[in-house]
Amino acid sequence: MDILKIEDLSKVYGKGVTEVKALDRVSFSVKKGEFVVIIGPSGSGKSTLLHLLGGVDRPTSGNVFIDNTNIYELDETQLAIFRRRQIGLIYQFYNLIPILTVEENITLPVLLDGHKVDGKQLDEIVRILGLKERLSHLPNQLSGGQQQRVSIGRALISNPAIILADEPTGNLDSKNSSEIMELLKMFNKTFNQTLIVITHDERIALQADRVISIEDGRIAKDEVLHP
Ligand code: ADP
Ligand code: ADP
C-alpha cells in the first residue's frame, strides 16, 4: 500500500528574472513501512520538498497524498490537524519547547488535539528512547542526543502515517548520530513505521531501503538497496 504519493510536484519561487524553479514535476510513491532517504547537494530542492511533504508550504502545482488524503485540498485548520496526527517531523535542531518538560514536549501533539495520552504507549516510547529518568527535565538540561530522542518521541506519539526527518543527525557527533539512526531504524523495522530521511550524508543513505537522489529540482536516481 502506498502511504505517500507525490504527483507532478513543482515549486517556483519569485517571478520574472528572480524566478527559481526549486522543484520540477517530481513524482514518486512510498510504501507503508519503507525507509527512504532523499539525498541531494545543497540547493537541489530538498528543503522545498520537505516543506511540501510536511504540509508547511504549498506547491505551485501538483499533489501530495498522505494515507489517501490530498493534503493541499485541506484548508489551513484541517491541514494543521492532519499534520499533527499524520506527519511526525524531526528537525536538525530538535525544535523542542524550552519551557516545557521532556514529558510535556513529547505529549504536546496529542494534547493539542484534545486527546488523552495513552500511558502505556508513552511508557513504551520513553523506555525505548531511554528517557525514563529524564521526563521532568527541561530540554536545556539534556545533551544533543537526548534532545533528539525527545523529538523522536514527540514525532511518534500520535502514531503518524509518516515520519519525516530533516538532517536528524546533522548536529550530532558520530556516536550520537549512529544511536539516533539505530533508534529510527528500530521504530521503522519493529513497528513498520514509514520513515523518510532527508540528508546530504552518504553514510545515512547506505542504511536505507531505498535512496532517491534529487538534483536541480528533479529526481536523478531512485534506487532500491534493501528490497
Ligand atoms: P536544499 O534544501 O537542497 O539546499 P532548497 O529547497 O533550499 O534546496 O532550494 C532549492 C532552490 O530554491 C535553491 O536554488 C534555493 O536558492 C531556492 N529557494 C529555496 N527557498 C527559496 C525561497 N524562499 N525564495 C527563493 N528561492 C528559494
Ligand atoms: P537547509 O539547511 O534546510 O537546506 P537552506 O539554507 O536551504 O536550509 O534554507 C533555509 C531557509 O531559507 C529555508 O526556509 C529556505 O526556504 C530559505 N531559502 C533558501 N534559499 C533561499 C533563497 N534563495 N531566497 C530566500 N529564501 C531562501
Image: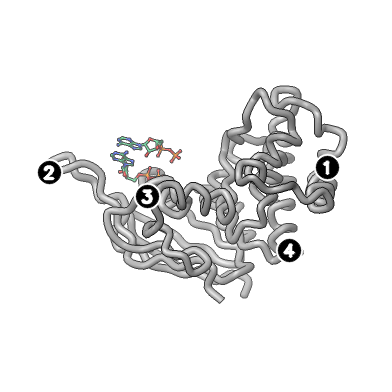
> Residue 202: in sight, yes or no?
no
| Residue at the spot of label 1 | 130
Q: Amino acid at mark 4?
A: Phe
| Element type at mark 1 | loop
- Residue at image point 76% right, 64% down: 190
What residue did someone put label 3 on? Answer: 45
Instruction: In the rendered view, tell whether residue 155 sits above or below residue 94.
Output: below
As drawn, the label of residue 16 is 2
Q: CA distance from mark 1 to mark 2?
A: 52 Å
Mark 4 vs 2, N-terminal side? 2
Q: Which residue is under mark 4?
A: 191
Do tag 2 and tag 3 residues touch (Cβ < 8 Å)? Answer: no
Disc 2 packing (10 Å; few <14; some 14–19; many ≥20): few
**Dot in front, 4 or 3:** 4
State the residue at coordinates (61%, 41%). 112
Ligand 1 within 8 Å, label 3 CB: yes
Secondary element type, mark 3: loop
How many marks on residues?
4
Looking at the picture, how far across and down is residue 161, in whole percent?
A: 59, 61
Q: Nearer the viewer, residue 190 or 226?
A: 190
- Please tell me whether mark 2 sits on a helix, a strand or a loop: helix
Mark 2 or mark 3, which has the lower sequence index?
A: 2
Q: Position of residue 69 (x, y in %)?
A: 46, 65
